[in-house]
Image (cartoon, rainbow, N blue to C red):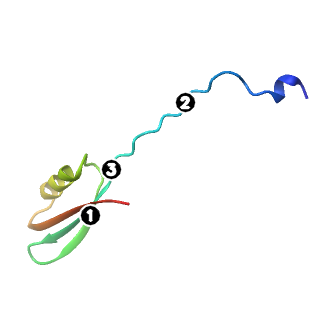
Amino acid sequence: MSEASRKRSNAAAAPKRRIARRPRFIAAVRFADGRTQCFSVDNAQDHADARRMVFDELSEVTAVVISDYR
């Protein structure tokens, strides 16, 4: 084996960038007729945005609870 093949390259490897994961939320929704359902909200920036999106997309919503999706 040659000497060059045993040595690691001294060239600095490009540092890996950590991509910030977008937050995911889960919405527990109660409808006017008493039904409940959970929805995943993936495009929201924060809890308030997730809540706003639920009210925009669904009708006859009585209550919404938003939580971090883990």
Depicted 42 relative to depicted 64: above or below: above
Q: Earlier in the sequence, mark 2 or mark 3?
A: 2
Quarter of the image for residue 12 reads: top right
For the point 48% across and 34% down, which residue is it?
17
The residue identified by callout 1 is 39
Looking at the image, tell me whether mark 2 or mark 1 is earlier in sequence order. 2
- What's the distance in space between the residues labelled 2 and 3, CA to CA? 24 Å
Tell me where residue 34 appears, x and y as whole percent: 12, 78
Of the 4 image quadrants, the one containing the N terminus is: top right
The quadrant in which the C terminus is found is bottom left
Which comes sooner in the sequence, label 3 or label 1?
3
Which kind of residue does numbered mark 3 sit on?
Pro
Residue occupying the far right of the picture? 1
Residue named by callout 3: 23
In the rendered image, residue 19, in percent from the top left (x then y), is placed at 43, 39
What percent of the width, then of the height, locates residue 33?
10, 77
Circles 2 and 1 in contact, beta carbons < 8 Å: no
User: Which residue is pictured at 33% across the width and 50% down the height?
Assistant: 23
Residue 4 is left or right of residue 57, and the answer is: right
Above or below — where is 35 with respect to 51?
Answer: below
Q: Amino acid at mark 1?
A: Phe
Amino acid identity at mark 2? Pro
**Is label 1 in a helix, a strand or a loop?**
strand
Disc ID at residue 15:
2
